[in-house]
Image: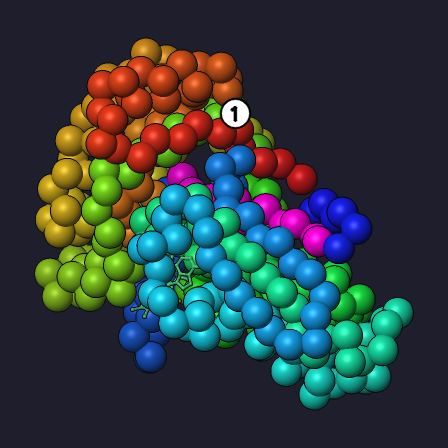
């Protein structure tokens, strides 16, 4: 987080699922999963300023793809949720205004710079929501227990609790069980989206409609190596939603073919429910060189390179 005289800016990094296994279904129709989340230095940004009311603006290359109703945006929803929590529990544990009067939690001016494609399997909205919770808790001087923040995050989306961490995480449950994971041996990813929006709900719905079987829950983390590498990922894991998303958006298959041909690529897979795919490289320099080449060959694709964030 950075702050100048009046603004606090918070980065909202892209989330990537290095693998994603669906292990079952809950009574309310959600899917249980096992996944390895990493966060990449390819980000949205949220600028926050104290105010007595809420004011929200979106700018950046993907601003136009978001619903124009500000109240529906995950940034606004996160802000309202945290303000309600602060108001409801002012002066009491687990949330209270620690160093400032409670009225400072009344509002904020918020500007989202939307650089991550939405509905793209890289959790841009989830990361925006998590960044808003973290940023406003700081702006409003709220003392809030990490467990309580995670509970609020889960109300905003299954991926939001993991996005509070911004470092490799083993994720289970529907997304609420997060445990620190080791840093992969490869250091950088190239993210590629062919320009198709694939809504998460549609992919899960198709998975269920196709009658696809679930992966056995393998509680994979106790048996994982100290450093996650390509051989372990290829040998033991996959993205169960990849074939489903390809059925909905066949362009994903040609993205994967292209990524697997790149010089120095360790692994190419789809992230989350797609359509964004990633290619893993040992170094940021190799990832940036591959991204340059892809931008030349496929100017119609969204292509970004970034290092994997650690603690
Ligand atoms: C698939 C994953 C993998 O990380 O990522 P994305 O592709 O969205 O990035 C996540 O589990 C997505 O989490 P998130 O994007 O927060 O999902 P939510 O907004 O809570 O749910 C959107 C819809 O997806 C389905 N859903 C989501 C999560 C889950 N564990 N089971 C589900 O069945 C439900 O139909 C739900 O209505
Ligand atoms: N700030 C936001 N950024 C992106 N999407 C948002 C945001 N606020 C609300 N949404 C809604 O949330 C949905 C999921 O967003 P996102 O997290 O980008 O998807 P994914 O997890 O598949 O990458 C979008 O389809 C959009 O309608």
Q: Quadrant of residue 164?
A: bottom right
> Going by the image, does 171 lie left or right of 208?
right
Q: Report x, y in % for residue 242.
A: 23, 45
Coloration mode: rainbow
Q: Report x, y in % for residue 184.
A: 52, 30
Q: Secondary structure at mark 1?
A: loop
Q: Is residue 75 magenta?
A: no
Residue 181 against residue 137 in the figure, above or below = above
Quadrant location of the C terminus in the rendered image: top right
Q: Residue furthest top?
A: 263
| Quadrant hosting ligand 1 | bottom left
* Residue at 49 percent of width and 29 percent of height: 306
Q: Looking at mark 1, is its residue's CB closer than 8 Å to ligand 1?
A: no
Residue 257 against residue 65 in the figure, above or below = above
Q: Identify which residue, 17 or 297, lies in the foreground.
A: 297
Classify mark 1: residues with Cα within 10 Å, few (<14), some (14-19) or many (20+).
Answer: many
Q: Quadrant of residue 91?
A: bottom right
* Residue at 55 percent of width and 57 percent of height: 111
- Residue 299 seen in the figure: yes
Q: Identify which residue, 176 or 141, lies in the foreground.
A: 141
Q: Report x, y in % for residue 81.
A: 58, 77
> Going by the image, does 154 lie left or right of 232?
right
Q: Report x, y in % for residue 36.
A: 46, 45
> Which residues, given as a range, are shown in magenta?
7-18
In the picture of the structure, the residue carrying the numbered disc 1 is 187
Residue 151 against residue 119 in the figure, above or below = below
* Residue at 22 percent of width and 25 percent of height: 298
Q: Residue furthest right?
A: 99
Q: Residue furthest bottom?
A: 88
Q: Identify which residue, 155 or 113, lies in the foreground.
A: 113
- Residue 219 seen in the figure: no
């Amino acid at each position: 987080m950075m702050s100048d005289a009046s603004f606090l800016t918070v980065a909202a990094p892209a989330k990537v699922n290095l693998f994603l296994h669906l292990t079952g279904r809950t009574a309310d129709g959600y899917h249980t999963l096992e996944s390895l989340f990493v966060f990449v230095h390819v980000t949205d940004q949220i600028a926050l300023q104290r105010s007595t009311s809420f004011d929200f603006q979106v700018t950046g290359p993907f601003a136009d793809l978001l619903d124009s109703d500000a109240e529906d945006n995950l940034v606004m929803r996160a802000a309202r949720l945290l303000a309600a929590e602060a108001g409801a529990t002012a002066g009491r544990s687990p949330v209270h205004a620690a160093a400032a009067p409670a009225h400072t939690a009344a509002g904020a001016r918020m500007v989202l710079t939307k650089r991550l494609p939405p509905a793209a399997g890289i959790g841009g909205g989830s990361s925006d929501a998590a960044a808003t919770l973290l940023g406003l808790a700081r702006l409003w001087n709220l003392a809030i227990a990490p467990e309580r923040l995670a509970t609020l995050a889960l109300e905003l989306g299954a991926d939001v609790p993991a996005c509070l961490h911004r470092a490799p995480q083993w994720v289970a449950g529907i997304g609420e069980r997060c445990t620190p994971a080791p840093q992969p041996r490869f250091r950088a990813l190239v993210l590629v989206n062919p320009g198709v929006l694939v809504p998460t709900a549609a992919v899960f719905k198709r998975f269920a409609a196709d009658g696809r079987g679930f992966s056995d829950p393998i509680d994979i983390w106790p048996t994982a190596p100290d450093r996650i590498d390509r051989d372990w990922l290829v040998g033991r894991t996959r993205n169960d939603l990849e074939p489903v998303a390809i059925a909905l958006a066949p362009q994903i298959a040609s993205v994967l073919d292209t990524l697997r041909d790149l010089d120095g690529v360790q692994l190419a897979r789809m992230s989350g429910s797609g359509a964004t795919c990633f290619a893993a490289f040992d170094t940021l320099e190799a990832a940036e060189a591959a991204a340059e080449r892809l931008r030349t060959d496929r100017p119609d694709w969204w292509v970004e390179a970034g290092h994997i964030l650690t603690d």
